[in-house]
Amino acid sequence: MSFDSATSLAGLWDSLLPIGRDDSTGGYRRFSWTPEDQQCRAWFTSAAAERGLRTHSDRNGNLWAWWDWPDSSPGPASAADAAGGSGPSGSGVSPEGTVPPRAGAAGGSGPSGSGVSPGGTVAPRAGTVVTGSHLDSVPDGGAFDGPLGVVSAFAAIDLLRSRGFAPARPVAVAAFCEEEGARFGVACLGSRLLTGAITPDAARAQRDVNGISLAEAMAAAGHDPEGIGPDEDLLASIGAYVELHIEQGRALADLDCAIGIAEGIWPHGRWRLDFTGRADHAGTAALAGRHDPMLPYAAAVLAARQAAAANGTLATFGKVIAEPGGANAVCSTVTAWLDARGPQETALRATVDEVLAAAERAAGLHGVTVAVRPESITPPVTFDPGLRERVAASLGARGITAPVLPTGAGHDAGVLSALLPAAMLFVRNPSGVSHAPAEHAAAADCAAGVEALAAVLQDLAG
Ligand code: GLV
Ligand code: MN
Ligand code: MN
């Protein structure tokens, strides 16, 4: 029976689609450690179980599903080897040279066969080829950002199995927690914790808009927050991470290509600005006597647009909370978040400096204080050139033309790339829109994405 990757994809997609969807907007509200998140996690576990994959929630709440290799011998090769050591570039090492030697790092020391100990804990094995993405969303996000990578990972495994492919290295599907930072402010929180890019104490202390800390939210969802932090063994077991993601622009549509390969990620970050003024009556407080925090906030918004245009960057205020929030009152505080990104760190820095200077200047003029806190800073990422070339070669061998593109969007692959070879595939999004319900990829392009991912997994894990 011939296998139709679109069929497998459609079944997975349809079962995930209703979770966390807001009927009034058509957008998704899948925030970490909420009931919707728990439903996504249950979906992941069930999709894995249907495929006989062993699942595990790591100490940080990231989900993993392992496709074991068929024999019970230890891992056959080092992770660097799996990631590109034998590929066209042969390096398997990032340009920064930060990839540690992985040969025998986990040593194939896990229990034979399953990778899961009798106690249910996982002893990961060296050279694992990991693919996946995330299941959380921004407020009213699109259906594809994150889920497409997880669904495609399972569908690619289905496709490879249908072709009789037996991996020589373990393959795993991952779904990382709180990638969007929509609830706790720090983007890619799950992968940052895994890699040690944020300390457990700092992560536990992050609070959502209702004042609930990450530690409290995890505990309420049944996950022990005391256990969070870097996981050396798990990291050491990963030979390569390949994340498929919907494109978050329309370069592929303009190039008439269904699939792209990521070159790197712009440096970007998120800054929280707390403007504090004095609440007063909108109908009686004279303009001259007001301490209105809305005014320096407005100045910051305009400065962001000007600074971004002047520096060739992007700057956005997409979230603002005015309190106490009476329509007939001067508010006492305005809390706003600046998201800024750019192709170079210097231009990004200049943009942020100009916005913050404008905010402080206007705050001074209006008798308001402003406190600034960086919440989530991500340095520039250049994906491992050796792995990227190998991915391109895998696709090229199957006649897939895939242009190499930079992106201004953040991804767990970018965080992981600081410690191990990572790569990304993009699937065409003709709408060019993302982080919004209009985000879209055609079914045929999603199927092409599964084919492309399967080709890469077959090469890396074969
Ligand atoms: C993640 O999608 C981000 O770039 O904010
Ligand atoms: Mn996103
Ligand atoms: Mn994403």
Image: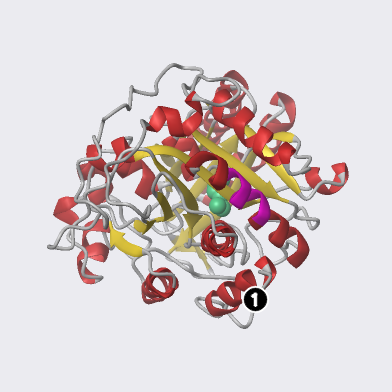
Asked whether, in this view, residue 110 is left or right of residue 408, the answer is left
Q: Who's the residue at 78% across and 50% down the image?
A: 258
Q: Is residue 280 magenta?
A: no
Q: Who's the residue at 61% across and 28% down the image?
A: 351
Q: In this view, does 210 lie above or below 313?
A: below
Q: Nearer the viewer, residue 205 or 174?
A: 174
Q: In this view, does 363 lie above or below 100?
A: below
Name the spot of residue 174 as percent of width and height, x first.
Answer: 42, 54
Name the spot of residue 54 as percent of width and height, x first.
Answer: 32, 63
Asked whether, in this view, residue 177 is left or right of residue 20, the answer is left
Name the element at disc 1.
Answer: loop
Can you tell me whether the CB of the residue at mark 1 lies under 8 Å from the nearest atom of ligand 2?
A: no
What range is drawn magenta here?
A: 451-456
Q: Who's the residue at 27% across and 42% down the image?
A: 74
Name the spot of residue 110 as percent of width and height, x first.
Answer: 21, 46
Residue most extreme to the bottom: 23
Is residue 236 at all visible to an observer of this figure? yes
Asked whether, in this view, residue 192 is left or right of residue 423, the answer is left
